Amino acid sequence: MNEENLVNTNVEDNTKFDKMDKPLSIVFIAIIPIYASIIIAIFIFPLARDLFWIEGWVFVIFFAIYAFFSMYTLNKKNPRVIRNRMKFRKEKKMKEAKSEKASISDKFILPIFGISFGLMFIISDLDHPFNWSGAFPLWLEVVGFIILGLGLYIIHLSTLQNAYASKVLDIREGQKLIDTGLYAHIRHPLYSGALGMIIGIPLALGSWWGLIPAIISILGLVLRIKYEEKMLLTELDGYKEYRERVRYKLIPKIY
């Protein structure tokens, strides 16, 4: 390759890099939380049969504030992760068959997670008019919101610290091992945050029965970690040594 080609290649690479790291429109950043909150409200209140359900409105407002804060901060400090998490297509063919199999596992794990997560909402909402959980303690609802808030904050920090956090199991172009911040203590902090979110939602909405599909969602996350680790061991340089240094997957000193 001659010198002119080398220069052209570097210019193309830099252009691509700059595009991924360019902040998105502030209008887009504002619209996404509003849109998501409206969808949640449309989903919650008809099932709850109560437009004035306090826990429901606290949840919607709570989520809207978090979503805007998170999107705004990520767009300012790490817009690449927003673009990566908007993608649903895998970017790279795996090196080995076992890694490809791990990547394909999303075809059955994500539907299981999506269905159980949706059922968690549906059951928690229906619990309000039918009172399946009886006199649910107010203090436990408060604890649920605290757990939910902590989980969402961990998700935010994880995406802020790892620009390659993605919804699909694959290795992004130019992806490097992240072993600082939360990743210095647990290998999958994004899933740790999701764990808090999943447990927090039915508690915040006052439903014992909503915890049943929540547990199924958590088992789906644990199963996904198993496949993800197989992929990372083969595809991501340094992951084997990182796994030996950082022993815990989700919860420090426990798991």
Image (cartoon, rainbow, N blue to C red):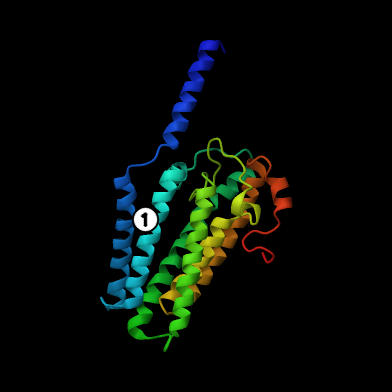
Residue 119 in the image: state x and y as whole percent: 42, 70
Q: Is any atom of residue 86 visible in this view?
A: no
**Looking at numbered disc 1 in the image, what kind of residue is underneath it?**
Phe
Q: Residue at x 64, y 58 (%)?
A: 249
Residue found at x 41% / y 66%: 118
Determine whether, in the image, residue 146 is placed left or right of residue 239.
left
Q: Would you name the residue on which mark 1 appears?
A: 68
Check disc 1: other Cα within 10 Å, few if <14, some if 14-19, many if 20+.
Answer: some
Which quadrant of the rendered structure holds the C terminus?
Answer: bottom right
Residue 59 rendering spot, x and y as whole percentages:
37, 70
Find residue 38 and report its horizontal and vertical position in percent.
Answer: 29, 62
Image side of residue 241 versus residue 26, left or right: right
Q: Secondary structure at mark 1?
A: helix
Q: Quadrant of the N terminus?
A: top right
Q: On the rendered structure, is 108 left or right of 247?
A: left
Q: Nearer the viewer, residue 136 or 171?
A: 136
Q: Nearer the viewer, residue 7 or 124?
A: 7
